[in-house]
Amino acid sequence: MRRDAVMRSAAGSAGLPCNDCLVGGHLCPKCLCYTGSKSVDLMPQFLSQVPPTLDLPSYTLARIRKGQGRLLVLTAALHQAGYALRPAPRVLIARVGQRSAARRSGLSRNTVAALARGVGTIYSYVTLVDKFGVHPRIVRRPRFSACFSSENQTWTTPLDLIGQILRAARRKRFDLDPCSPRHDGPVPARIRWTKDEDGLKHFWAGLVFCNPPYGRLLSRWLAYCALQAAHGAVVIALVPARPDTKAWHWHIVGKAVVIMLRGRLRFGGGQGSAPFPSALVVWGNPHLAEKIARHVPGSWHIPIP
Ligand SMILES: C[S@@+](CC[C@H](N)C(=O)[O-])C[C@H]1O[C@@H](n2cnc3c(N)ncnc32)[C@H](O)[C@@H]1O
């Protein structure tokens, strides 16, 4: 009842008497609606920012447009469409503390705790930010994060890192780059395969440099690196350092030397530094791996046990 009343008011009667009980003011004592309160103003303003292109069933979208529905559903759809909610409830609540957030907003501790976990309702979120005098906004996520998500897989290896590896190997170029953006791609290599040729469909030979697409197929690329090294290639891969993942445990641990890189790489085609740590993984030549670690400043290597 209480929420319905708020939503009725949110639909456009800010500051006006409540339609049901005709009591204006901040908290209608009869039906407990918030007629005239700030959240009444904020909700339509917030809802008007919901992009029309969200990938949601129409009835879910309709509920969201009425200010009903779950925050998690909205934030997940926004994330997928390249948008984000500001302020993020987790950030706001962490800044002020759950107890104080509950006291100031009038929401229960459980509701605030739910919002801090990213769940709860859209209504509670708007009520919370309203009480802190903040305008909730739906913003485009910075290009940076899109660039490093699996949606965009075209960033390229920093040239200074390529130079250090080639110097360690005493080579001018690699024999193969199996995942190149173009046939004249940025990695110096005798042979370059692009998506059209599909580097995962060929045998690899010689000194191979592989900076694979970091999407869902990354683990397939790691498996293929390990397989081709078992058939005689020396494979150097540049990958996100995620030693806790299954892919690392299956295809790297005990099979390859890992060189952990210091700091965050600035990939070509990206803006700023990567949001994840990176590692070079070397299959098929532990001696070369040690040399590379010596040529890459600040790196440290984990030999095959
Ligand atoms: C992270 S980029 C690396 C580019 C380059 N190798 C470098 O290190 O600078 C990954 C590249 O792999 C290409 N790619 C994606 N799938 C591929 C496939 N199946 N076979 C070959 N290349 C592929 C993408 O087009 C993208 O340009």
Image (cartoon, rainbow, N blue to C red):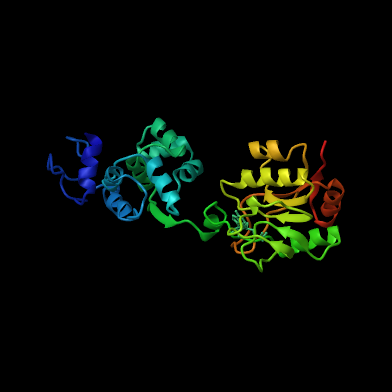
Residue at left offset 64%, top offset 54%? 199
Tell me, yes or no, if residue 132 can be seen here. yes
Q: Tell whether 255 sits left or right of 25.
A: right
Q: Quadrant of the C terminus?
A: top right
Residue closest to the eye, 263 or 149: 149
Q: Position of residue 117 (x, y in %)?
A: 46, 37
Q: Tell whether 196 sits left or right of 31.
A: right
Q: Tell whether 33 sits left or right of 168.
A: left
Give the image quarter of residue 180. Answer: bottom right
Residue at left offset 50%, top offset 44%? 95
Q: Quadrant of the N terminus?
A: top left
Q: Position of residue 20 (x, y in %)?
A: 13, 40
Q: Position of residue 97 (x, y in %)?
A: 49, 39
Residue at the far bottom in the pictured view: 184
Give the image quarter of residue 32. Answer: top left
Residue at left offset 82%, top offset 49%? 289
Tell me, yes or no, if residue 245 can be seen here. no
Residue at the far front in the pictured view: 202
Above or below residue 173? Residue 110 is: above
Above or below residue 218? Residue 246 is: above
Q: Tell whether 305 sits left or right of 115.
A: right
Q: How many marks?
A: 0
Residue closest to the eye, 61 or 179: 179
Q: Quadrant of ligand 1?
A: bottom right
Q: Position of residue 246 (x, y in %)?
A: 64, 36
